[in-house]
Structure formats: C-alpha cells, structure tokens
Image: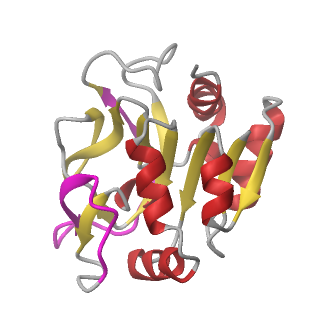
Amino acid sequence: MIAILDYGAGNLRSVENTLAEIGAGYMLVRDAGGLRDAEKIILPGVGHFGQMMRALDALQVRDALIERIRSGVPFLGICLGLQALFERSEEAPEADGLGLYQGTVRRFPIGARVPHMGWNQLAGSGESRLLAGLDAHAFVYFAHSYYAPTVAATAATCTYSLAYTAVLESGNTFGVQFHPEKSGPCGLRVVRNFVELP
C-alpha cells in the first residue's frame, strides 16, 4: 500500500485524485506506525518549509520517515517534499530538514519574479526510472519561490533565473520540484512510474 503522509497541509486531494485515476491503492497516514507499514511513501508539500518540518516533528514521524527512506522504501517527495530532503532552507533557517542530502534550499535571486509559477521545461541529465517514457525536455507545472541545489542525485534540472534540481533520484529516493498532479499526461506518467516501481 502507498502511504501519503498527511501532516495537516499540502495538496492531498489532487495527489489522491491522481493515484485514483491510475488505479493505485493508497492510504493517508499521520503516524510513525503508518509509515513503517507502508510499501511506498509520498510526501506532498505546499506552503512553508518551517511549518512543514514542525508539523512532522509534532506528529513524531521524522525518525521513522528517515529510517524508511534509508532502508530503501520507495519515497516520492513533491515540491516542498523534495526540499525537505535537504539539510535546511533559507525560508526557515531555524528548522532542520531531513538532512538526507547536503545543501541549503535557497530563494530565487533578487530580480527573479517569485513565485516561479507555471509551465517550464525539464532538462534530463541521464537515465531516470521516474522519467521513463517522457521526453527529456518535457514541460511540467511549477509553483515555488525556493529551489534545491543541484547534487549528484539530480536527475533533471529546470532553469528559472538559474539551474536547479527539478527531479532528484537516488536508489529508491525520488523528489520532484514540480507538481505532477497538475502537469497533465506528463505528471500522470511520473506518478505511474513511481507506483509501478518494484
């Protein structure tokens, strides 16, 4: 069963609708036990980095989430869910991220209109199970003011004022800065690829 981590915010309904559209079973979870029972985990995120991390701590799921990701359970972080994988964010310097990847999530430079909202193009950087079947330069839908740095696990970038991580993939850990649930057929394919992972 796929667990959608419900921390009290986020675009849960649209993610649920996308999973339902492709016939994937799922459940909403709000505790560590639910995460430990999950075969796959999705962390959708919208809003504020600090609020999300405080909510995860209030639910006491941080350690279980890190444990499950490190053990190889397929994980997909969406938008803020990708940013949470890093150590920290300029949006909330006092809040620790999950720290699975080194680096700081930063605000787009002065002069760039924020939020970066609308359709933009991916630039794939090699083989990706998450992007299988998609054009390497597919257009997807973004809505964010902060961006994750490029790292060794970056599978695709997007350029908006500068190049940043649009897709992260390492082992069974995946993250997308864009919103697949708002990205039409391309986004549907991304979610299906995640669901169909062995």
Q: Residue at x 50, y 42 (%)?
A: 75
Residue 30 x %, y %: 68, 68
Based on the displayed image, in which of its 4 quarters is residue 167 positioned? top left
Evaluate whether residue 178 shows in this view. no
Question: In this picture, is 26 found above or below 13?
Answer: above
| Displayed quadrant of residue 171 | top left
Against 110, residue 102 (above or below) is above
Q: Is residue 44 left or right of residue 30?
A: left
Q: Is residue 111 magenta?
A: yes
Residue 25 visible, this angle: yes
What residue is shown at x 66% (from left), y 65% (from top)?
6
For the C terminus, which image quadrant?
Answer: top right
Quadrant placement of the N terminus:
top right
Q: Report the front residue among 137 and 7.
A: 7
Q: Which residues are magenta?
A: 95-123
| Magenta span includes 15 | no
Left or right of residue 120: residue 41: right
* Protein image colouring: secondary structure
Instruction: Point out residue 177 in the picture as x, y percentages from the top left corner.
Output: 41, 49
At x 58% / y 48%, what residue is drawn? 42
183 vs 154, nearest the viewer: 154
Image point (26%, 86%), residue name:
94
